[in-house]
């Protein structure tokens, strides 16, 4: 055999081997690796090595093929924090590309209306990486509390408290459309003041259909420069939500939230407000009521135009409280 033929033969064998290797590799990376939906979380702040270790720990053994493809393409340095989902039957190539391009999943984050910031922060961080205590601290800030519009939002899993704050501020600006701003101006209120008043209205009534009536009453008192005398603000000032019967001694609490002693609105909202109550303040019922009192055995209120009428309603409610043995 001549030297030329030998070289040619060797080259042919090598070529065939390379071709077979390429075909095999292509089939390998195009092949399916997961038999069911797989979810992995890559933590923010981790480096490339930590991300690869985390993938190794969270992926099933068949996911080693994805890791091998990442290394072969030198894509480890592209890994980004986030939640990634790999659907059943996805190929090795597509899964590796998903990781390398940061094609991560958004999660649903529920911001609830309510009074207690701890449980609200706990619910908000149920599906994201953010620390609930830091979110609670962020939500409790005076600059944030009135800007929170309770709703369900899509956020990235790796979101922290600062990222959430930025998103909530953005959503707050979006909610306050020009029509809503105009409605607030017509009432002589700023968006912050609307939120403060709405928080009182929501604390007063759980019946949303009654909220515009309650809002109208408080607006009447503000226009007449009367103290709001809102019991929920006293309960907030006393930090005692167990109070079911406001007594004269409660009205002596030294606090800017004491609306029996201080005219106008308190300095901030007393709860995170359901946006329906914001609407009730922006679109109140016009009437001549200045007083209200809970109805005995009911969740709604009796409304009165005069203090004499109000006293009759209040005495009836006090008698009912006594019968129920509710003294505090």
Image: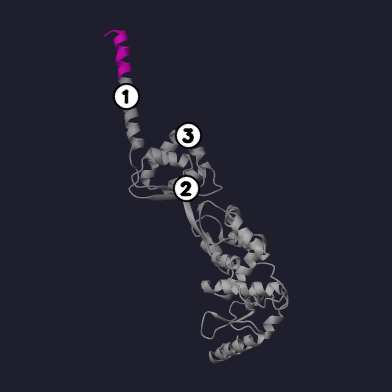
Using the rendered view, name the quadrant where residue 240 is placed: bottom right
Residue holding disc 2: 54
Q: Which element carries disc 2, helix, strand or loop?
A: helix
Residue holding disc 3: 74
User: Residue 17, labelled with which disc?
Assistant: 1
In three-dimensional space, the C-alpha distance between marks 3 and 2, rounded to whole angstroms, equals: 17 Å
Residue furthest front as drawn: 287
Q: Position of residue 205 (x, y in %)?
A: 56, 75
Q: Badge 1 local density, few (<14 within 10 Å), some, or many (20+)?
A: few
Magenta region: which residues?
1-12
Residue furthest left as drawn: 1
Is 117 a magenta residue? no
C-beta proximity under 8 Å, tags 3 and 2 = no
Q: Foreground: 70 or 161? A: 161
Q: Position of residue 117 (x, y in %)?
A: 58, 66
Against 174, is 113 above or below? below
Q: Determine if residue 141 is in view.
A: no
Q: Badge 3 local density, few (<14 within 10 Å), some, or many (20+)?
A: few
Colour scheme in the image? one colour
In three-dimensional space, the C-alpha distance between marks 1 and 3, rounded to whole angstroms, equals: 24 Å
Residue found at x 58% / y 75%: 204
Q: Which element carries disc 1, helix, strand or loop?
A: helix
Lower position in the chain sequence, tag 1 or tag 3: 1
Lower position in the chain sequence, tag 1 or tag 2: 1
């Amino acid at each position: 055999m001549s030297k030329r033929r030998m070289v040619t033969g060797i080259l042919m064998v090598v070529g065939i081997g390379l071709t077979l290797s390429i075909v095999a590799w292509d089939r390998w990376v195009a092949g399916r690796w997961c038999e069911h939906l797989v979810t992995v979380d890559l933590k923010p702040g981790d480096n490339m090595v930590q991300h690869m270790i985390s993938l190794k720990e969270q992926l099933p053994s068949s996911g080693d093929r994805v890791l091998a493809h990442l290394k072969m393409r030198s894509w480890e340095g592209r890994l980004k924090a986030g939640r990634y989902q790999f659907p059943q039957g996805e190929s090795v190539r597509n899964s590796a590309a998903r990781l390398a391009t940061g094609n991560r999943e958004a999660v649903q984050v529920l911001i609830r209306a309510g009074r207690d910031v701890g449980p609200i922060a706990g619910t908000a961080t149920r599906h994201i990486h953010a620390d609930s205590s830091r979110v609670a601290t962020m939500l409790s800030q005076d600059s944030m509390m009135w800007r929170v519009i309770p709703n369900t939002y899509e956020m990235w899993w790796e979101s922290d408290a600062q990222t959430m704050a930025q998103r909530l501020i953005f959503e707050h600006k979006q909610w306050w459309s020009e029509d809503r701003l105009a409605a607030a101006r017509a009432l002589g209120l700023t968006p912050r003041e609307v939120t403060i008043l709405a928080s009182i209205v929501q604390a007063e009534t759980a019946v949303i259909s009654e909220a515009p009536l309650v809002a109208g009453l408080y607006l009447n008192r503000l226009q007449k420069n009367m103290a709001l005398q809102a019991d929920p603000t006293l309960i907030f000032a006393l930090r005692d939500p167990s109070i079911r019967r406001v007594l004269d001694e409660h009205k002596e609490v030294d606090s800017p939230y004491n609306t029996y002693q201080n005219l106008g609105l308190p300095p901030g909202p007393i709860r995170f407000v359901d946006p329906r109550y914001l609407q009730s303040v922006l679109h109140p019922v016009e009437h001549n009521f200045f007083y209200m009192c809970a109805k005995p055995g009911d969740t709604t209120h009796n409304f009165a135009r005069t203090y004499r009428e109000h006293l009759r309603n209040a005495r009836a409610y006090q008698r009912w409280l006594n019968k129920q043995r509710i003294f505090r």
